[in-house]
Structures are given as structure tokens and as C-alpha cells.
Image: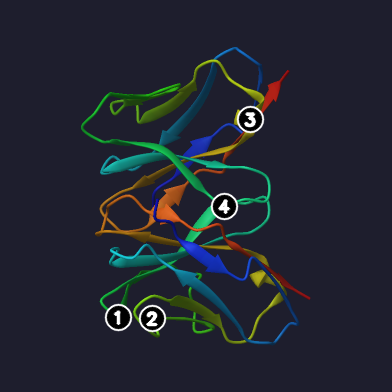
Amino acid sequence: GEDVEQSLFLSVREGDSSVINCTYTDSSSTYLYWYKQEPGAGLQLLTYIFSNMDMKQDQRLTVLLNKKDKHLSLRIADTQTGDSAIYFCALTGGYQKVTFGIGTKLQVIP
Amino acid sequence: EPEVTQTPSHQVTQMGQEVILRCVPISNHLYFYWYRQILGQKVEFLVSFYNNEISEKSEIFDDQFSVERPDGSNFTLKIRSTKLEDSAMYFCASSEAAGETQYFGPGTRLLVL
């Protein structure tokens, strides 16, 4: 089945850029997502990219997709303390379910 | 902005009891889903529901689980006889169509004692 891998932890200084990486195995993925989960809260859809795109930019967020390497990344420019959260890489393939990675905990140091 | 809502936010129950988790999907969405997240683990797909029937389910979704759309707005997950290992955060999601972006609710944290 599909597998989505992410590193568990990332620490950055406030004002720096954060880059969260994700690799996946399902080459038939159609939508690839980044969800954000703050402590005790639900899953907030941050952004998504279609599989026929290489890049998507949305304000401070840049998503890069390398389909050949099955690699997805999320860059957060000018990272703020409010960006501290767990970031989940997720994707849908030919089926209806969303497959999630374990989540990367982003710690922003003031 | 339309959003998925879930009730209750927290539920504590005794092992062997039945629980019903409730969700109100986004109104024009046609596909509904349940996921769960055991503490420290990945978010896992449980079931998808369309046109008043289950369209896909995972191995986790055994006979103890059932889903229902009792009226035009609610979508429920029932666990008939809860086990300790059912303790998790349960997320409801909805989408306009199959394969489209799924929007998640805030979750119900279930604790089975």
C-alpha cells in the first residue's frame, strides 16, 4: 500500500525559512496535501498541489513536487512562533482515502 | 467559511460501552469519511461513505464499527463495544466528490477506561 515518510522534528529560528520534506511511494497520487495540527486541535488544510504541478505558492507557503523522486516539500518563509505545530504530508491516490505521514513537529525558537 | 463540525469534543467511556460520535459535514459535500489518530501515531483512514452506503473501509473498520447518515445533515460513527485500544482522536471529513480535497473537523477525543 501507500507509504508516506516524514522526519519527526524540525527546529528553526523565528524569521528563518522552514523546509519540511516528505517522500511517498504511490506514484498514482492525484492530490498532495499539507495539513497543520496545533496542540489539541484538529487538522487544518494548509495547502495542496495537483500531481500535474511542480510548484505552488500561497503567501508564505511554497510547495514543491518532484514526481520523479516522489518528493514533496513545504517551505514556510519568515517562520513565526505561531507556525509551531505538527505538519502532516498527505496524499490521495486512485482511492478515496487520504494517506498521512507521521507528521513533522516544527519548533520555532524566538 | 463552511466547516466540518464534530460533537462531542471529548468523550470518556467505560470499556464495553457503546459510543456514538457525531459530525456535520459541509453542506454541499457528498462524500464523508472517518479517520482516527491514536496518540503518537499516524492519522489512519477508517471508512468512506457516499450515497448512503460505505464505499471503502480499512481493516480497522471491523464489525464493532458502523456509520450512518440519520438525516440530511449528520454523519455518525458508532462503536458498539468499546475497547481500551479504541482510545484515539476521531476525525470526520467531507469532500465534494471522490478524490477531491477532504476538509477535516476538529476531532473527538475518545478515552476508553
Residue A52 located left or right of residue A25: left
Residue A94 visible in this rendered orientation of the protein:
yes
Specify the quadrant that holds the C terminus of chain A.
top right
Q: Chain of mark 2?
A: B
Badge 3: residue crowd in 10 Å (few <14, some 14–19, many ≥20) = few
Residue A18 numbered tag: none
Q: At which x and y percent is residue A51?
A: 25, 36
Mark 4 or 3, closer to the camera: 3
* Image spot of residue A29 (x, y percent): 29, 43
Q: Name the residue beneath numbered marker 1.
A: B52
Element under label 2? loop
Query: Farthest residue toward the right?
Result: B113
Secondary structure of the residue carrying tag 1 is: loop
Same-chain status of marks 1 and 3: no
Spatial CA distance of label 4 from label 3 is 16 Å
- Quickly name the residue at label 3: A82
> Dot 1 falls on which chain?
B
Measured from the top left, where is residue B61 in percent x and y? 48, 74
Marked residue chain, label 4: A
* C-alpha span from label 4 to label 1: 26 Å
Q: Read off the residue under disc 4.
A: A42
Write down the quadrant of residue A68 in the picture: top left
Q: Which residue has dot 2 on it? A: B69
Query: Is A68 placed left or right of B34 in the picture?
Result: left
* Amino acid type indicated by mark 3: Gly
